[in-house]
Image: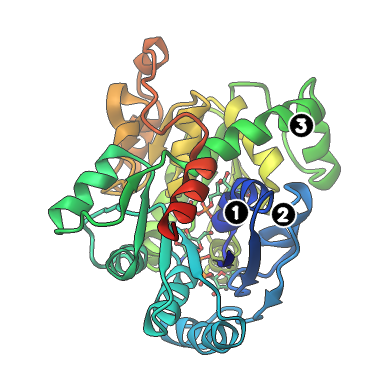
Amino acid sequence: MKLITIVGARPQFIKAAPFSDVFRKQHHEIMIHTGQHYDQNMSDIFFQELSIPKPDYYLGVGSGSHGLQTGRMLEKIEQILLKEKPDGVLVYGDTNSTLAGALAASKLHIPVFHVESGLRSYNKRMPEEQNRVLTDHLSDLLLCPTKTAVENLKKEGITDGVLLTGDIMVDAVNRFMNISNKRYSNSKWLETLKAENPHIPLLKEKEYYLATIHRAENTDDLMKLQTIFTALERLDKPVLIPLHPRTQKLVEKFNISFRNVTIIQPVGYLLMLYLTKNAYMVVTDSGGLQKEAYLLKTPCTTLRDQTEWIETLENGWNCLCPINVHSIMEKASRKLDCLNHAQPQVFGDGNAAQRICQAIVNNFA
Ligand code: UD1
Ligand code: UDP
């Protein structure tokens, strides 16, 4: 079987790592990297650290408006699909690279397999919601990380090709946390951070906030972005932010103040896992990070009005937070009763990659 997989953005590289490893043991994978993310610390570092096979095609699409970026991907992916004639195309998540891959394949009547299918925020203004709804409706196999995702699809009348596989991010966390521990325990995490960021304050385990901000709904609105930084400045513990380049550019352009907040470049996944496990709390608008915080038993405050990962809200591990200074400070300093609660295995057992492979094989049986 010849499968084309499409990646382009940071979280997709992380999901591709466990899948490619399992799939390539028996089958032929051709990987396309759209080039949506291209900085060394947004792309190459993941391929190197996580031993992801080198992409067979690099499209170099880069940044741009949604239409321009998606259109360029669509055009280039179509050419490759016509040349390679794969048996199927696999896409991950909800980025513009996901939609472009699904659309190009679907128009050529090539089966589409969607990993992380069925997630919904029910906020149609989110580019990710548009991408995932459209991708789901084009897909032949809808590979769901949670029962909630399966139910969401049912509400939209989609039941054919729907499979509960568990979340491939659990596979990634299980696989890479051990390596991360070996590399960064015994203060090596701090030495690594200091080597690249001499200005960094002394951080102690479980005594800092780890924050990330990049979601369009927070960054496109300057008032919101300023409010987030004002709140972070006022928290009672040091705040460390590996900052997405989208947000970094805005912080510089608008001269946003970040006293008491330490901004660093985006870090590799292995260090990110360690920083997440080690943090007092994660404060984020990321999808993947909310869940990693949960899996690593670190409380989280999510700077959004909705989450696709509603299971993380149970027992207060994660908490949604509107963007105003008072709410952010209040939620970030809430009592952490969640630490006394056991967590049910709602995201699967860490064998999602294996189930996804089997589902694809069965699709052709
Ligand atoms: C994209 C996804 C989002 C996902 C995120 C993961 C869409 C619509 N959004 O958002 O769902 O959560 O990736 O991180 O697909 N930039 C750089 N260097 C890079 C990449 C981006 O400087 O390597 C800057 C550019 O100024 C670019 C901006 O970041 O315009 C936004 O990048 P883009 O890929 O369009 O969206 P993300 O915010 O990364
Ligand atoms: N991540 C990382 N380095 C960073 C910030 C995030 O490795 O500096 C990882 C994070 O652990 C998670 C993934 O990137 O696995 C999430 O990506 P992002 O927040 O960019 O996208 P989202 O999940 O919101 O789509």
The residue depicted at 45 percent of the width and 49 percent of the height is: 286
Count of numbered tags? 3
The residue indicated by pointer 3 is 189
Toward the viewer: 18 or 180? Answer: 18
Q: Secondary structure at mark 2?
A: loop
Q: Which quadrant of the rendered structure holds the N terminus? A: bottom right
Q: Is residue 232 left or right of residue 21?
A: left
Nearer-N-terminus badge (3/2): 2
Describe the colour scheme in one phrase. rainbow
Q: Which amino acid is tagged 2?
A: Ile
Q: Is residue 325 left or right of residue 121?
A: right
Residue 276 drawn above or below residue 138: above
The residue indicated by pointer 1 is 16
Q: Secondary structure at mark 3?
A: helix
Mark 1 is surrounded, within 10 Å at the Cα level, by few (under 14), some (14 to 19) or many (20 or more) other residues, namely many
- Name the image quarter holding residue 193: top right
Residues at marks 2 and 1 touching, judged by CB atoms closer than 8 Å: yes
The residue indicated by pointer 2 is 52
Mark 3 is surrounded, within 10 Å at the Cα level, by few (under 14), some (14 to 19) or many (20 or more) other residues, namely some
Nearer-N-terminus badge (2/1): 1
What's the distance in space between the residues labelled 3 and 1, CA to CA?
25 Å
What's the distance in space between the residues labelled 2 and 1, CA to CA?
7 Å
Toward the viewer: 28 or 306? Answer: 28
Q: Which amino acid is tagged 3?
A: Trp
Mark 2 is surrounded, within 10 Å at the Cα level, by few (under 14), some (14 to 19) or many (20 or more) other residues, namely some
Q: Secondary structure at mark 1?
A: helix
